[in-house]
């Protein structure tokens, strides 16, 4: 397969599997692992209509439809394509406001994004969102969520085999909504891992790229963002990967899978916080050996912020393997329901840009 064809295949698979993970995890978001296993007789393995006690259900989301996670990622991917791959902070803000104004999934948006979008619409200083009293100190709950990480994979797709370049571009998509060390570190980890994956790296190198990206994100944040009290992304990621190592020492099977997810939830976490859900996504990718179907099934069954975890893990796994490795029945159903996002032509546009980036190295 020619280089550009291979890139297009991997980029399409990344975009598609990220969306499939999002849609698979939408009906289980906020649920416990025990509730998921009880309702589905084990992990969730097929698309179902989101029930009313989930964000997707409350926002009239349908079976196999993406949520804000993948829809925001697709808007970013289209913006990158229109800009020739050179999207700056101003271009990203315009994209975010476009998504908030026109996407039917904007009602799902997370807390950090929602506050910034409101300020931008009103022409207010985004630096004043979430401040304490009359000070300039923001609450530690502002800008520390996984919104930047969940949408950033297309940045990595544009930089095959160039994780550091992906991190440099990722910074613009973190600001102004996720202006913290932990969120930027997490987003750079996903961008770097995706860049390594689409460039043909194996799992060990993809995980190493994620860790290196997280470290680069910390360096970028030291110059452009703020440090907040709370857990460190890289420390939590190393904890999560240690849990993977321990789990692999046990006999394989459904019980091992569930025990792995339960320990990951108990010790690392699976909430909307970047220091929880992003390490968990990377750990599930590693535990599942990046197998596309297993990765999104386990991520969608991990409890709490299942759709975001499955979106991030799915984007990397898809980029590693290409279209033929994806579960084909699910892929066909997903593409039929989400045809409006135009993933086929979008992947072709991004592949052309990525090929240019590859030649420019």
Image (cartoon, grey):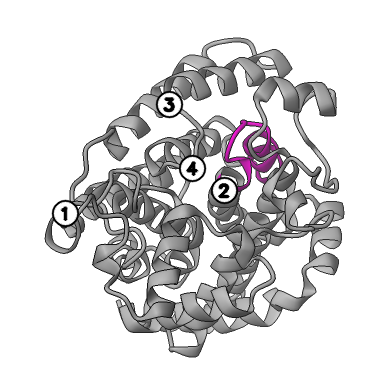
**Which one is closest to the eye, mark 4 or mark 3?**
4
Q: Are marks 4 and 2 in contact (CB under 8 Å)?
A: yes
Residue situated in front as seen by the camera: 202 or 245: 245
The x, y position of residue 5, in whole percent, is 61, 76
| Direction from residue 196 to residue 301 in the image, left or right | right
Q: Earlier in the sequence, mark 4 or mark 2?
A: 4
Q: Which mark is residue 272?
A: 4
Q: Is residue 291 left or right of residue 157?
A: right
- Nearest-to-viewer mark from 1 and 2: 2
Q: Which mark is residue 219?
A: 1
Provide the major secondary structure of the magenta segment. Answer: helix
Q: Per the image, is 296 magenta?
A: yes
The residues colored magenta run 291-308
Q: Secondary structure at mark 3?
A: loop
Crowd band around label 2 with a 10 angstrom C-alpha radius: few (<14), some (14–19), many (20+): many
The mark lying in front, picked from 4 and 1, is 4
Q: Specify which label sits upstream in the sequence, 3 or 1.
A: 1
> Along the polypeptide, which appears first: circle 4 or circle 1?
1
Mark 4 Cα shell of 10 Å, populated few (<14), some (14-19), many (≥20): many
Few, some or many C-alpha atoms within 10 Å of disc 3 (few <14, some 14-19, many ≥20)? Answer: many
Q: CA distance from mark 4 to mark 2?
A: 8 Å
* Of pointers 2 and 3, the one earlier in the residue sequence: 3
Q: Work out how far the residue at label 4 is from the one at label 1, CA to CA, in angstroms.
A: 23 Å
Label 4 – label 3 distance at C-alpha: 12 Å
Identify the residue under disc 3.
Answer: 268
Instruction: Report helix, strand or loop for mark 1.
Output: helix
Please provide percent x and percent y for residue 313. Answer: 55, 46
Which class describes the residues within 10 Å of circle 1: few (<14), some (14-19), or many (20+)?
some
Q: Earlier in the sequence, mark 1 or mark 2?
A: 1
Q: Which residue is mark 2?
A: 308
Q: Are marks 4 and 1 in contact (CB under 8 Å)?
A: no
Is residue 82 visible in the rendered structure shown here? Answer: yes
């Amino acid at each position: 397969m020619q280089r550009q064809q291979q890139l297009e295949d991997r980029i399409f698979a990344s975009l598609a599997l990220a969306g499939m993970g999002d849609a698979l995890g939408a009906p289980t978001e906020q649920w416990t692992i025990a509730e998921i296993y009880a309702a589905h007789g084990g992990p969730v393995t097929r698309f179902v209509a989101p029930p009313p006690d989930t964000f997707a259900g409350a926002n009239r989301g349908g079976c196999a439809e993406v949520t804000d996670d993948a829809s925001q990622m697709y808007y970013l991917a289209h913006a990158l394509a229109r800009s020739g791959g050179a999207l700056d902070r101003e271009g990203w803000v315009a994209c975010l406001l476009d998504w908030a104004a026109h996407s039917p999934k904007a009602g799902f948006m997370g807390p950090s994004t929602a506050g910034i979008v409101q300020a931008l619409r009103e022409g207010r200083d985004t630096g004043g969102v979430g401040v304490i009293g009359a000070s300039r100190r923001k609450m530690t709950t502002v800008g520390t969520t996984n919104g930047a990480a969940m949408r950033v994979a297309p940045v990595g797709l544009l930089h095959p085999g160039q994780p550091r370049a992906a991190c440099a571009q990722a910074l613009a998509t973190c600001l102004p909504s996720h202006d913290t060390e932990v969120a930027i570190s997490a987003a750079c980890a996903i961008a770097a891992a995706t860049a390594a994956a689409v460039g043909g790296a194996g799992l060990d190198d993809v995980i190493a790229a994620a860790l290196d990206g997280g470290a680069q994100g910390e360096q970028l944040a030291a110059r452009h963002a703020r440090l907040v009290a709370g857990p460190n992304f890289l420390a939590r990621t190393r904890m999560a990967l240690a849990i993977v190592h321990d789990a692999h020492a046990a006999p394989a099977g459904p019980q091992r899978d569930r025990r792995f997810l339960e320990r990951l939830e108990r010790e690392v976490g699976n909430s909307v916080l970047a220091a929880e859900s992003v390490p968990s996504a990377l750990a599930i990718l590693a535990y599942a050996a990046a197998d596309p179907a297993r990765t999104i099934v386990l991520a969608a069954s991990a409890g709490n912020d299942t759709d975001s975890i499955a979106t991030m893990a799915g984007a990397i796994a898809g980029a590693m393997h290409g279209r033929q490795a994806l579960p084909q029945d699910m892929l066909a159903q997903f593409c039929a329901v989400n045809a409006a996002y135009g993933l086929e032509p979008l992947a072709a546009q991004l592949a052309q840009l990525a090929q240019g980036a590859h030649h420019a190295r």
